[in-house]
Amino acid sequence: MSRQKGGATQDDQKPGQSSPAPGVILRRRYTKDLSFENPGAPASLDAPPGAPAPTVAISVEIGGRRRGDLHEVALSVTATAKSRNEILFIAEVRYAGLFEITGLDAAAREQFIYVEAPRILFPYAERILADAARDGGVPEFGITPPDFAAMYARREKDPVEM
């Protein structure tokens, strides 16, 4: 249910009234949390060539609606690199955006929140994580963008998944 001018909600509309034009605006994007751990440095910085690529975990978190049509979407990305059983580094970022979503029905709004919003936020989160790792002395690594549509489809089958 979203607020329109005059305090009415979409659910309160009378037949013949028009709803707001569909639209999405990214009002803000921001880092909620950032962490880089390099527990074995400086020894771990001399990792041999061909050291294993970090494993990456990605999740999407949805905050409660804030002020009407504003929705917070947070993307958590964690990269962990190990050699043998020793942690070389752990880099984590929780990056969020505040999206104003108007004129979309509930299904389209949910799909935008779980698929398109994370897709918009991902390059920013990846860059922050890569910069933190580089500044920590770790060789640069890339993270393949995940298929957020597939993650959403899995979430539909198992809501605890995403």
Image (spheres, rainbow, N blue to C red):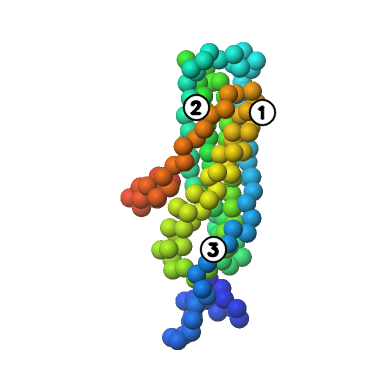
Q: Amino acid at mark 1?
A: Asp
> Which disc number belongs to residue 135?
1
User: SS class of the residue under badge 3?
Assistant: strand
At 43% from the left and 66% from the top, the residue drawn is: 106
At 48% from the left and 25% from the top, the residue drawn is: 53
Q: Position of residue 44 (x, y in %)?
A: 59, 16
> Where does label 2 land, which residue?
54
User: SS class of the residue under badge 2?
Assistant: loop
User: SS class of the residue under badge 1?
Assistant: helix
Tell me how far mark 1 sits from mark 2, CA to CA: 16 Å
> Which disc number belongs to residue 24?
3
The reply to whether dot 1 and dot 3 touch (C-beta < 8 Å) is: no
Going by the picture, which residue comes out furthest to the left?
Answer: 157
Q: Amino acid at mark 3?
A: Val
Q: Position of residue 105 (x, y in %)?
A: 44, 68
Label 1 neighbourhood size at 10 Å, few (<14), some (14-19), many (20+)?
few
Give the mark nearer the N terminus: 2 vs 3.
Answer: 3
Q: Position of residue 118 (x, y in %)?
A: 50, 49
Residue 130, compared with residue 87, is above or below; it is below
At 49% from the left and 81% from the top, the residue drawn is: 18
